[in-house]
Image (tube, rainbow, N blue to C red):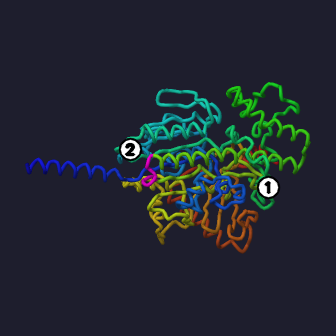
Amino acid sequence: MKPLFSIISLGIALSTAAFSADERPNIVFIFTDDHAPHAIGAYDGWLKSVNPTPNIDKLASEGMLFVNSFCTNSICGPSRAVIQTGKHSHKNGFMNNGNTFDWNQQTFPKLLQKAGYQTAIYGKSHLKGKPQGYDSWAVLPGQGLYYNPDMITEDGQITIEGYCTDIVTDMAVEFLKEKRDANKPFMLMVQHKAPHRNWMPALRHLNLYDDIEIPEPATLFDEYLDNAPPARHQELEIDRHMHINYDLFLDLTPDFADLPIRTDKSAWRNLQRMTPEQVKAWRAAYAPKDKAFHEAKLTGKDLVRWKYQRYAKNYLRSVKGVDESVETLVNTLEELDLDDNTIVIYSSDQGFYIGDHGWYDKRWMYEESLKMPFIVKWPGVTNPGSRTTKMVQNLDYASTFLDIAGAAIPSDLQGVSLVPLLKGENPDDWRKSIYYHYYEYPSVHMVPRHNGIRTTRYKLMHFYEFDEWEFYDLKSDPDEYINLYGNPEYQGLIKRMKKQLDDLEAKYEDDSDMSEKPQSWQDEVRPMAAK
Ligand code: CA
């Protein structure tokens, strides 16, 4: 009898060991597009009074919020490529949205698969091509649509009726409930299109915030008097560049109730794909607002203020859908009893201008678009309601995920694991500065290529094709109104920071062409965007 007993004991021991091995935490990575930290209540920005994100705020109250969280290159596709690879844009090859991601290269989901994780991604990939490194996936083609979007699946392209944020949430819930391999930990990426341009809210949110005025940013009427010339030559102003039809889907006819839908602009193209019921609800919500606009005959600053309100409300309505998605995902984890061993992360690919400096969009190394939200709830590890001011970047996510999984971190990754910070440790040798490099120029919105360094207090930016510099003291000037580059008092500090910038370029092996362009090129490009 004894040998048999031993065999049974051994069997129990083995299954216990296998069970223990699979106790590594699951990861739910909720990632949105263009959601600025200052449009999250927990980040204490000037939009906090609107209470835009109660569920993301709850996540922060149960986990850790990263105050100094930054992207390396403030644009959609490149930010995602940095996350996939743990490498700066010049290393992963996806430097601007016109590039195509090389899925054959090393990515963290592939490494997690090798380490025994089940991996899945649903929603916006924005990296083109067929995703690699995922056991289950469905992605939007390109930017994707808010309503009745096409989705590329493992079985080909399909069209799904509904609102994109809800569809992606449903796919993630289906994964958790039906596709999950109970023998493996999982890493699930839930990547929403919202709140990306052209900001189209869910039908249930079309009248949200109708009865309030969204606060205006202090910098709404910034005239860029002290900036280097690029800030005056951009094309992302609410005043001059935000299109009242394309961006705000205002019907241009004053009495339009029975007229056919306009089809010449983006949001209206999506309206063409909507069901009659969806269109009816959409027009019922916007017709009174549009009528009031036409009757008001606004001009000048009053028109800018109206555009800002329309934009900010639609942006925050789109955010509301995302916040509800967070609630659904968290509730699903609880329902499935997975919450205790699942890390939930909220992040977005970069920050965004919500009227700050009179702008929309991103791209700049200025604060509003440089910052990324990063909130991590790791039950039993992160202190509830904790905050860290350590400087982190999307560059660090891949190393962090691999560290969480107990997998080896390849030496060619350029980020560092955030696990020590998540555990509440305070490493003395943590980075004192971050490196930034934006490449997409000349292109939409006309933000010149620039790179730079930001410390906890200072920021140095170089628009190298024009050899123009900016320098800010973020402590005394958080809105970056006063460019100190030419100020004699700061020349020693600026010289030292230029050296540090050189050191960061060398550290990250950034061998991009950063030469000043010939004057003839500068003369040709600059007038295209001149004010
Ligand atoms: Ca984006």
Residue at numbered disc 1: 220
**96 with respect to 46 (left or right):** left
What residue is rendered at 77% in x and 53% in y? Answer: 214
What residue is rendered at 77% in x and 27% in y? Answer: 261
Mark 2 vs mark 1, CA separation in Å: 46 Å
Are the two marked residues, 2 and 1, in contact with CB atoms closer than 8 angstroms?
no
**What amino acid is at disc 2?**
Gln
Query: Looking at the image, is 20 positioned above or below residue 141?
Result: below
Residue at numbered disc 2: 113
Residue span colored magenta: 336-342
**193 with respect to 120 (left or right):** right
Residue lying furthest bottom in this view?
Answer: 489
Residue 391 painted magenta? no
Residue 339 painted magenta? yes
Indicate the position of residue 107 as horizontal and vertical percent values: 44, 45
Indicate the position of residue 124 as horizontal and vertical percent values: 57, 40
- The answer to whether residue 338 of the structure is visible from this angle is yes
Q: Nearer the viewer, residue 447 or 221?
A: 221
Numbered circle sitting on residue 505: none
Indicate the position of residue 145 as horizontal and vertical percent values: 64, 34
| Secondary structure of the residue carrying numbered label 2 | helix
- The answer to whether residue 463 of the structure is visible from this angle is no
Indicate the position of residue 526 as horizontal and vertical percent values: 76, 47
User: Does the closest atom of ligand 1 sit within 8 Å of the Cβ of label 1?
Assistant: no
